[in-house]
Image: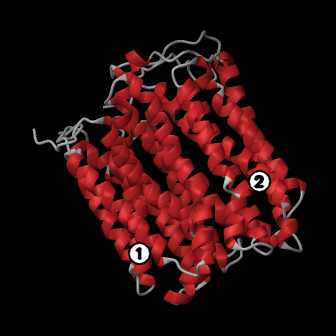
Amino acid sequence: MRQGPLAGRYAAVAAMVMLALIPYLALSAALEPLTPIIGAQLHMSAQTLSLSSGLGNAAYALGTVLAVQFAQHLPQRRMLLGYAALLVVGSVLAASAQDAGMYIAGHVIQGLCTSLLLIAAVPPLAIGYPRDKLRMTAVIMNMCIFGAVALGPFVGGVQAQAHAWRPLFWIVAGIAGMALVLAVLTFEDSPPANLDSPRDLPAISLAAVGCVAAFFGASELTSHRFVSAIVLAPLFGGLAAIVVLVVYQYRAKLPLLTVRPLLRSSIPVAGIVVALFAAAAAVSATGLTAGVLAEHYSPVRIGLLYLPELGGAVITALAFGAVINRKAMHYLPLVGMLFLAAGIAVFRIEVPSSQALTLVGSALAGVGLGATVAPALFVAGFSMPSFSLQRIFAIVELLRAVAAFMIAPIFAHFAATVAGNVDDGTAIALWVGLGICLVGAALGVAIYALSGARPQKPDLDRFLGGAEPAWYSPPLLARLGSRQPARIPVMEGVD
């Protein structure tokens, strides 16, 4: 089979994954201070800019499902080359945009290709190498997602201070180009995952309708009231479509996504709950507090004040790598939720926060975010056989994207309208975020307790063998039934 000169070399493949994932995620976090500049130069209104971000995030969420379907019937590494090439095209299109259409098209392509690359490239990196590499993969995964997001506000602030946006977009295009080069150099041809699996057009249609409608409705909050039809109809209609997708995949005999085994097992459900609640709560900890500080400080100063988030992300990435083969891995998401709650509480002390409180709050929030979502993702993944990891990542990342990206405009609208001024509205929203965080932590603990689940040291050799999970996860809420917890068939619902 055809191979590139760097095929099979972990360092090169890991670098390709990092370069593929970081650009869009960092850019999304950097856009807030740049939107006025982009809008003025491309003649885009605030509503149009909000719509462009919403559609880009919708494409990111949808790409998680498309990646799994493509992997079943098309050569996976050749598709990865196509995703990387299309990411370059989208990045160049956005960087060279002369009008709103070019910019939106480029940004949507960036979002779509980033999630396609995430689902196509990260699982093989996690399970395609010896177990001693899994520790580094965990660190890379954490840094790609949350390190990039934490760095975004600083990068955006620097660019906004220079009253320019294209240099950053061209840098992103250059990074995407480097990812494409490494994808070619590390190419290792591989066949489709399962040519006998069905082409699940209903699942793709539900994901497309749900993601586009929900994110469109949320983006319309920039210029419309929450109770307006243009917001409520697509927002709740889209969420309903995503719920129908989950139910449909749960009941399907040959599902595209691994939903039934996940939702019938305690440990992955606890991991998903923690990941979703952390993603939703983090919006109030970062986006809203940065918004009120924009009235008092320059963009670059705000970026510096939130730079400790990056330090927190680095610390927890290293901690995650250290505990990934230990029983303590189960405790890390809970610790992260407590740190995130502490960060929100610090931001709530004073609105807008002082510089000292912002530095402390952002550091705590960074630790909290880094210790929750990625570790919870792996906790869910270790509860299933490794050959289903791609599908597990897809469903969890789809739900996380909805929780994180769609909640942001809703919280922003809430903060701007619920009280007499934005500061008071943000203070109320912080209470809501703190409540979401604590409820998520309590639910995770309750699921373990009511199911008879216990922290276990993962058997990574068995997991990497492909057919067995890394630990035993009892049935969901098994202790509430009359029977003793029993093993469930982990193969159920997986081709």
> Mark 2 and mark 1 in contact (Cβ < 8 Å)?
no
Position of the N terminus, as image quadrant, is: top left
Q: Is residue 471 above or below residue 405?
A: above
Of labels 1 and 2, the one closer to you: 2
Q: Which structural element holds mark 1? A: helix
What kind of residue is marked 1?
Ala
Q: Which residue is mark 1?
A: 94
* Spot occupied by residue 416 in the image (x, y as percentages of width and height): 78, 72
Q: Marks 1/2: CA distance? A: 33 Å
Q: Which residue is mark 2?
A: 359
Q: What is the total number of numbered labels drawn onto the structure image?
A: 2
* Spot occupied by residue 399 in the image (x, y as percentages of width and height): 53, 48
Q: Residue furthest top?
A: 484
Q: Which structural element holds mark 2? A: helix
User: On the image, which quarter does residue 95 sit in?
Assistant: bottom left
* Spot occupied by residue 83 in the image (x, y as percentages of width and height): 30, 57
Residue for point 53% across, 69% down: 53
